[in-house]
Image (tube, rainbow, N blue to C red):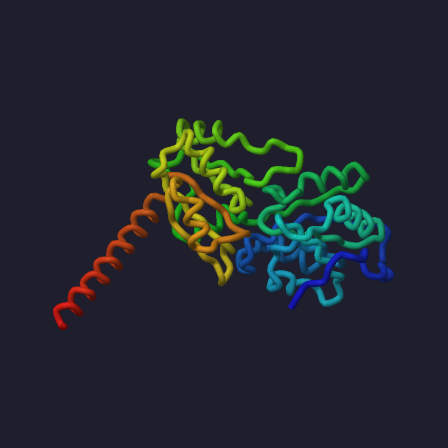
């Protein structure tokens, strides 16, 4: 079932008691409704208007009151998106109408969620905003595979970075980042990097070894989650071969080493089993 679009503004206004509205930016987490915080759940249930990002699952939106107005304002790379200025206009309009507005965002509002831009816009208009954090996909994706982002022996820190630059922006200096990650022993978590994986791989290889372990996780925490383990030298080829697409996170660093070894062992066992089966068939003939 397709979601409504935002070709039209908010639905016709209902009479609303009270003169002052409110606005809360809520992190919906990576998708699994059980990963919502209690505070986020309460905010969703209390909202009279919800402005919902494209990556928020229907199971989470279902917690909203039946009386709430739900407006989908999807923003995804490579897809038709609602202009940011229009979203901010809708938020301000609803607050001025006295509504209890919840801006429901995938992951965390302040990690590549444009939450900072929206807070600045609303505060400039005299509206105070509450922010409720959510679990970001970069954390949930790797955790779901039993792998940490930091480790005393493998990673002294973690960097969340976007692989998709704002139009007109030069974007991330991947060469500098690779050198820093190598010298400081950092895990790199790359959001929105699948479409630019070939370029990112090439640039990171200037500072990191080709055998640096990599994991790509698509649809983190959802039933359709998929992942692949590779090395930095095979990153792009692995994404193409496995058919991985957005939304995905790419994790680069030695914390993935255990997964890479396990994957290699599994492949070796599968190949050994296949060879043994072939020999048995030849002997039978």
Check the image and report above or below for 66 versus 79.
Answer: below
Picture residue at 87% right of the left edge, 61% below the top: 15
**For residue 129, side relative to residue 161 (left or right):** right
**For residue 10, side relative to residue 133 (left or right):** right
Furthest-bottom residue in view?
A: 285
Picture residue at 42% right of the left edge, 44% below the top: 235
**For residue 149, side relative to residue 8 (left or right):** left
- Judge whether residue 169 can be spotted in this image: yes
Q: Quadrant of the N terminus?
A: bottom right
Q: In which quarter of the image is the C terminus?
A: bottom left
Which quadrant would residue 38 be assigned to in this image? bottom right
Horizontal and vertical percent for residue 229? 38, 49
- Judge whether residue 47 can be spotted in this image: no
Along the line of sight, the residue nearer the viewer: 249 or 131: 249
**For residue 94, side relative to residue 4 (left or right):** right
Picture residue at 76% right of the left edge, 38% below the top: 123
Furthest-front residue in view?
A: 285
Horizontal and vertical percent for residue 66? 72, 67
Horizontal and vertical percent for residue 274? 23, 62
Along the line of sight, the residue nearer the viewer: 186 or 75: 75
């Amino acid at each position: 079932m397709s979601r409504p679009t935002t070709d039209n503004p908010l639905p016709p206004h209902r009479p609303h008691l009270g003169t002052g509205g409110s606005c809360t930016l809520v992190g919906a987490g990576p998708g699994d409704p059980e990963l919502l915080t209690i505070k986020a759940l309460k905010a969703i249930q209390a909202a009279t208007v919800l402005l919902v990002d494209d990556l928020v699952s229907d199971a989470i939106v279902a917690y909203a009151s039946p009386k709430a107005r739900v407006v989908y304002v999807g923003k995804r790379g490579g897809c038709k998106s609602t202009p940011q200025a229009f979203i901010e206009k809708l938020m301000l309009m609803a607050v001025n109408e006295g509504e209890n507005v919840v801006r429901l965002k995938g992951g965390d509002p302040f990690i590549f969620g444009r939450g900072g831009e929206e807070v600045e816009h609303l505060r400039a208009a005299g509206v105070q905003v509450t922010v409720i954090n959510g679990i970001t996909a970069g954390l949930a994706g790797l955790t779901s595979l039993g792998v940490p982002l930091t480790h005393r022996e493998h990673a002294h820190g973690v960097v969340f970075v976007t692989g998709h630059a704002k139009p007109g922006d030069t974007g991330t200096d991947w060469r500098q980042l690779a050198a820093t990650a190598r010298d400081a022993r950092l895990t790199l978590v790359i959001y929105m990097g699948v479409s630019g994986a070939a370029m990112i791989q090439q640039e990171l290889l200037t500072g990191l070894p080709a055998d640096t372990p990599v994991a790509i996780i698509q649809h983190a925490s959802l039933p359709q989650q998929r992942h692949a383990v590779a090395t930095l030298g095979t990153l792009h080829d692995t994404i193409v071969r496995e058919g991985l697409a957005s939304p995905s996170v790419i994790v680069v660093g030695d914390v993935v080493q255990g997964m890479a070894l396990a994957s290699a062992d599994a492949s070796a066992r599968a190949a050994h089993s296949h060879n043994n089966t072939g020999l048995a068939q030849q002997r039978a003939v």
